[in-house]
Amino acid sequence: MKIIDIHSHFFPKTWPDLQAKFGGDDWPWLKHLPNNGESFDKAMLMKGAQEFRPIYSACWDAQVRLAQLDEQGVEQQIISATPILFAYEKPIEEALYCAQLFNDAALEICQQGQGRLFALAQVPLQDIDAACKEASRAMNTGHVGIQIGNHVGEKNMDDEGVLTFLQHCADEGIPVFVHPWDMMAAERTKNYMMGWTVGMPAESQLSIVSMILGGGFDRVSQSLKICFAHGGGSFAFLLGRLENAWLHRDIARGKSEQPPSFYLDRFFLDTAVFDHDALDLLVKKVGTAKLMFGTDYPFPLGEQQMGQLIKTSQTLTKTEQQQLLANNAEQFFNLPISV
C-alpha cells in the first residue's frame, strides 16, 4: 500500500544566532553533540540555556530521513516545524523573520527529498496581516499547506484574528494543520512528560471545541481544509459529554448554531493515536474520509512502526486502509500522485 505521512517534524542543521540578532535569552538553537561512532549525528535542542529535547540527524538530513522511510515502507512525507520555532510571543518583526527563515529551510530539505518530501509553512499568527501574507508567499514558493499552533497566548481558535486567517486560507485553498503547543497547566504536568501525554491531547480537544462553540465553523467558509493533530486529542472520547452539555445547558452552546456533532464533517484528524480502539472510535465518529495517516516522526513519542496501526486494523477494509494511508492526504494537500 502507498503510505503518506502528513505529520512529521524537522529542524535545520544550523540557523542564525537569534539571541545575538534580537536579544533575549530564550531563543531555540541546536547544540550538536560528538558522534562517538554512533549511527546518527545527534544534537540537543536548546531554549536559551535550558535543554529542551534531544534530536538526531533525521531532523535535518534528507538522506537519513529517506532511508528510514524506505525501511518503513513510507513513500512520501510532509514535514513541518516543531512549535518551539513559532515565536508567537515575540515582536512581529522577529516572528516574521523566523517564519521566513524556517520556511525556506524546510524547502531546502524537501529539495533534497527526491520528490518525496513536502513542507508545511509556519506563519507569525500574532499579526494576522503578516500571517496571511506569509501564508500566500509560502504557498507560492512550494509549500503544500500551513501549520499553526492551536492558540496564540490566551487566544483560542475562535479568536477574531485567527478566524480571519482561516478564512484567508479558505479563500486561497490553503490547507491548514493545527498542532497543539505551549500546553496548559504547565506546572502541574511538568513531571513524567505529562505535558505531552495529558496536556497535548487536552489542547487538541480545546482547539476543536473552541472552533465549534465559538462559532468558527459557522463563520468560516466550508471550503476551509483544516486538520487537527494527534487524532484530535481527547475530543472524540468526550464528544458525548460536549453534546449533552450543548443540549441541556444554554450557556454551554456558545455561539454555535448547531450541536457539536453537526460539525464532524468540517475537519480532518490525523491517526497518531497508537491504539486500535482509539482508531476505531475516530472512524465511528468522523468516518474514513476525514482521517489521514500521521506519525509525529522522528520523535520518540511518534508511531515507531509507521503505518502498522492502520495496516493491522481488524475493522478497516483494504480500501479504507489505503484511504487513510494515502488517498485522503493526496486530495487534502493536492499532492502529486506518484505511479
Image (cartoon, helix red, strand yellow):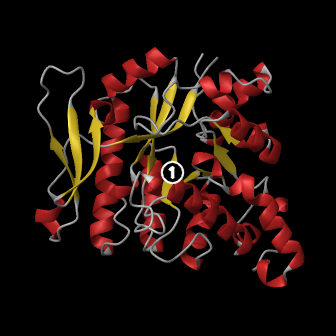
- The quarter in which the C terminus is drawn is top right
**From what the image shows, is residue 224 above or below residue 293?**
below
Residue 129 percent coordinates (x, y): 46, 73
Query: Is 20 displayed left or right of 334 in the figure?
Result: left
**From what the image shows, is residue 237 above or below residue 113?**
below
- Location of mark 1 (residue): 197
Task: Give the quarter of the image for residue 261.
Answer: bottom right
Disc 1 crowd, CA 10 A, few/some/many (<14, 14-19, 20+)? few
Residue at image position (69%, 70%) is 216
Residue at image position (68%, 35%) is 328
Q: Nearer the viewer, residue 70 or 160?
A: 70
Residue 210 percent coordinates (x, y): 66, 70
Inspect the image, locate mark 1, and give the three-letter code of the amino acid beneath it: Thr
Residue at image position (31%, 37%) is 108
Residue 177 percent coordinates (x, y): 55, 51
Most extreme residue toward the right is: 247
